[in-house]
Amino acid sequence: MKKVETVLSSSGAHRQVKRGFGSLVFRVALFALLSAAGSGYVFAGGGAEKSGSSQTAGQNLAGKGESLVVFVPGVVSGSPIYEMLVAGVQKAVDEKPGSTVKVVEGGFNQAEWESKITSLAASGVYQLIISSNPAMPAICQSVAAKFPKQKFLLFDGQLEGNPQIYTLRYNQREQAYLAGYIAALVAQQAGGAKKLGLVAGQEYPAMNDIILPGYLQGAQAVDRVFSVDFRVVGNWYDAGKGSELAASMIREGAKVILPIAGGANQGVIQAASDGGAKVVWFDVNGYGIKPGVVVGSAILKQDRAAYEKTRLYLEGKLPFGKAELVGVADGYVDFVDDDPAYIAAVSETVRKQQAELVTRLRKGALTLREDGTEVRK
């Protein structure tokens, strides 16, 4: 198996911008998994170094293949979107003899990300820097200007026209619409107030301009009377505050809640379980987190995107300078409708109604632009 060097940041609280939740168990499991694979570790941010040799993986194989680095703006463990990113890139690298990948956790201080990416580019070791975050295109464009030979593969962001950078962004309007539609169907069947909840870690452009309105749009496609109670935790880790906000929503009539609040998601789940409400999950399959409480999962297939685009790069076919927006019909955004826990938790009537929407989106019969405009075929 190929050698992987992982750099883990020792700084920053365990929170993730937009998504994911910290877990010591996950960190230990990740460490054990990579150690079993013969990985070398470097603990950044002032920590001790531990490596399988005196050289980095990239230096060991310089000249024998491509050296790639995944820069994670946060931490990997407990953040599903970044776990998928790393897994997809690793799979592509495993299929390319002589190529290597290094994973660098950049921590949560966004002010430090540019200097850390600059250091990676300045090293001259890595032909491709891979990352995923809406802030990355602007940061990497600044770095690219200083290092004209450096290439970047960026997910969950958009920048077109720079010959050093390729970006792929997910249609989160469609993703949120799917979540809002199933939430409204479940709430409607439960009876009572036609109100949903959305608990966010923080406010940010994609949340305010795409996800929140998309969630409401999906709900109102079921019934125009539906409203969304939107509340903000203020960070990405406070489960107690998440529980408090969700409990208040439930008392005020919200039947289904969408949490996008990192570690605070766990508080929302507990409040819903205690209060007889339901939860819709975002980005990954969440049915197993609390079977019977989680009634929908609108997902991103970042592992697939990372694998396919990294493989294109390794084949010399990645179209740098291009910015792609992908959605349900492209196979990168979807709704998990075949999980036994979903089938057990949601009535057949509701599942059939949701399936009709999902089928239309998958076939391209319905497409949603990010401004909410519906395109029907």
Image: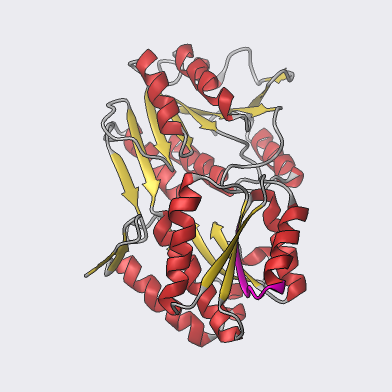
Asked if one can make out residue 321 in the rendered structure from this viewpoint, the answer is yes
26 vs 377, nearest the viewer: 377
The N terminus is located in which quarter? top right
Give the number of marks: 0
In the image, the segment drawn in magenta is: 251-259
Q: Identify which residue is drawn at 58% across, 48% down.
A: 19
Report the side of 47 relative to 208 (left or right): right
Up-down relation of residue 22 to residue 148 (above or below): below
Quadrant assignment for the C terminus: bottom left
Residue most extreme to the left: 377
Residue drawn 66% across the image and 41% down it: 15
Front residue (pair 345, 233): 233
What scheme was used to colour the molecule? secondary structure
Whether 119 is drawn above or below 69: the answer is above
Image x and y of residue 375, in percent: 26, 65
x and y percentages locating residue 169 in the rendered image:
38, 45
Q: Specify the quadrant of the image occupied by residue 16.
A: top right
Q: Is residue 257 magenta?
A: yes
Q: Is residue 96 visible to us here? A: no
Of residue 376 and residue 344, the one placed in the foreground of this image is 376
Give the residue displayed 38% in from the left and 13% down from the top: 146
Q: Left or right? Give the position of 347 relative to 322.
A: right
Residue 146 within the segment the image draws in magenta: no
Tell me the residue at 65%/65% (across/down). 288
Of residue 173 and residue 318, the one placed in the foreground of this image is 173
Q: Quadrant of residue 92?
A: top left
User: Residue 343 at x, y = what percent?
Assistant: 56, 78
29 left or right, relative to 18? right
